[in-house]
Image (spheres, grey):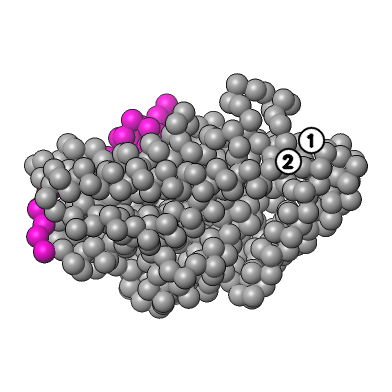
Amino acid sequence: MRGKILLVLHAHLPYVHHPEYGSFLEERWLFEAITETYIPLLMIFEEMKNFRLTMSFTPPLLEMLKTKDLQEKYRRHMEKLIELSKKEVEVTRNEDSRKHKMARYYLEHFQRVLGVFESFGGDIVEGFKKYQREGRLEIITCNATHAFLPLYQMYPRIVDTQLSVAVRNYEKHFGKKPRGIWLAECGYFEGLEAFLSKHGLEYFFVDSHAFWFADEQPRYGVYRPVMTPSGVFAFARDPESSEQIWSSTVGYPGDPRYREFYRDVGFDREYDYIRDYIDPSGVRVNTGIKYHKITSKSLDLSQKDYYDIDEAMEAVEEHARDFLRKKEKQVERLIEVMGVEPVIVAPFDAELFGHWWFEGVFFLKRFMELTFESKVLKLATPSEVLDTLDEVQVVMPASSSWGAGGYYDVWLSGKNDWIYFHVHEMGEKILELAEKYKDSCDPLTERVLNQMLRELLLAQSSDWAFIMTTGTSVEYATNRVKTHIKRFLDLHEQLIKGRINEKVLEYYEWVDAIFPELNFRILVGDGQP
């Protein structure tokens, strides 16, 4: 008897596309994720003989990765980064040898990354599709704009629309229906599973306490999936795996040999030298070229020692083997107690691997390679688990999230609660208009309502509320929400007064172009599962 482990990576970024600008600071979020996480994952997939991994790709991320304008901006971004890397190779010849070693490493690495990007014609989604077709990667969806669904449960048609758009978007990009879904922020409320069932979704993920405080205690705790009353399966996160990797105090990413995230040449180099490689406004940003290691958490950034990639790879090997040993011991302990095959669910934000934790991608690769040699532990996907289940317990999970505190307060606090007065009102307005104009044959009216729905969906993104709570990029997040509210209300007024400004409409359609196939009639009906 062997235990199964599900490695689940949640790949998501909010929809940030500013075609009205040649470059835009927050578009770098996508570029960094492509360079440091998504393409490095494709690179390790190509190097591995076999692996099993589950990834969610959110609709906003898919739409951005498929956008030609963003692809072209990314090319320019990488060309500048490679240009900077070449300068760094020359400059560091007269500096510490460890810096010069890493400068050469970065140049070669960035050239490889751009090469992989070009090998798919700029569309790296095709790369992930390749591994899904081969059965090594299971790709699941996420609700349309990563809205925190528990805060919309009083509007069934809004919840239904978030899920319907998600399933249709997945079909558009992957050519088939998704079997599972990652609910944004693992945000779950009792009854949500019935909406998932309506859209043909077979499973979803929740945090540990959704099982611990369920209506009936799951016999095997978080170590077997349960079936909800609607027939949809729920998998719960394993707290042990999360702590071993996520924890800021005992987690692997804090090892002193690993690369220091917060020390970057974008801040270290003189302004005249670096200005062509940071934001055009002059704001200094991370470039991805970093020469220092964590060294010690007690040291300030100026005291960090130089990083060595070979030393870091030794740590990767140690940690991959240590994680496997811990998982094997955990499985042996669980088999002894449970008497059945345990299923360990280890979900993480994809960007932890490569972006936040530079060596994380190499850790994943080594752990998966080692696990394929294990006689105790087996890598699996959720579908493989469900297809081999012989018995299951019916349980209603408790309302929950994977945010701090485990409930909803990250997305509904004194710092962001103002959002919902407006967004809920927007939802009520468009639901009324959708019913009123569902039989309209006027193309212009249809376009206005379609765009109003886009603005609503974009305003519902959980990212903006999250950013306001955490205190990073708050001004941008606030402006984004206010902008979508303003555009929605502007179009609403034009429609009600019968004076539609087509030039304004065209502009909104251009700058907020997510889901071009969207039709407002998706809102029509009672929304009930």
Magenta stretch encompasses residue 405? yes
Q: Residue furthest top?
A: 298
Location of residue 392 (image quadrant)? bottom left
Q: Is residue 50 among the parts visible in the rendering?
A: yes
168 on left or right of 12: left
Q: Which mark is residue 291?
A: 2
- Measured from the top left, where is residue 496 in percent x and y? 44, 57
Nearest to viewer (mark 1 / mark 2): 2
Please tell me which residue is depicted at 65% across the width and 22% down the height of the picture. 299
First of labels 1, 2 by sequence position: 1
Element under disc 1: helix
Q: Which stretch did the figure color magenta?
A: 390-415
- How many residues crowd around disc 2 within 10 Å: few (fewer than 14), some, or many (20 or more)? many
- Measured from the top left, where is residue 344 in percent x and y? 28, 50
Main secondary structure of the magenta stretch: loop
Q: Is residue 457 among the parts visible in the rendering?
A: no
Q: In the rendered view, tell whether residue 273 sits above or below residue 50.
A: above
227 on left or right of 524: left
Q: Disc 1, disc 2: CB below 8 Å?
A: yes
Please tell me which residue is depicted at 63% across the width and 57% down the height of the picture. 35
- How many residues crowd around disc 1 within 10 Å: few (fewer than 14), some, or many (20 or more)? few
In the rendered structure, which amino acid carries the disc numbered 2? Tyr
In the rendered structure, which amino acid carries the disc numbered 1? Asp
Element under disc 2: loop
- Measured from the top left, where is residue 423 in percent x and y? 41, 45
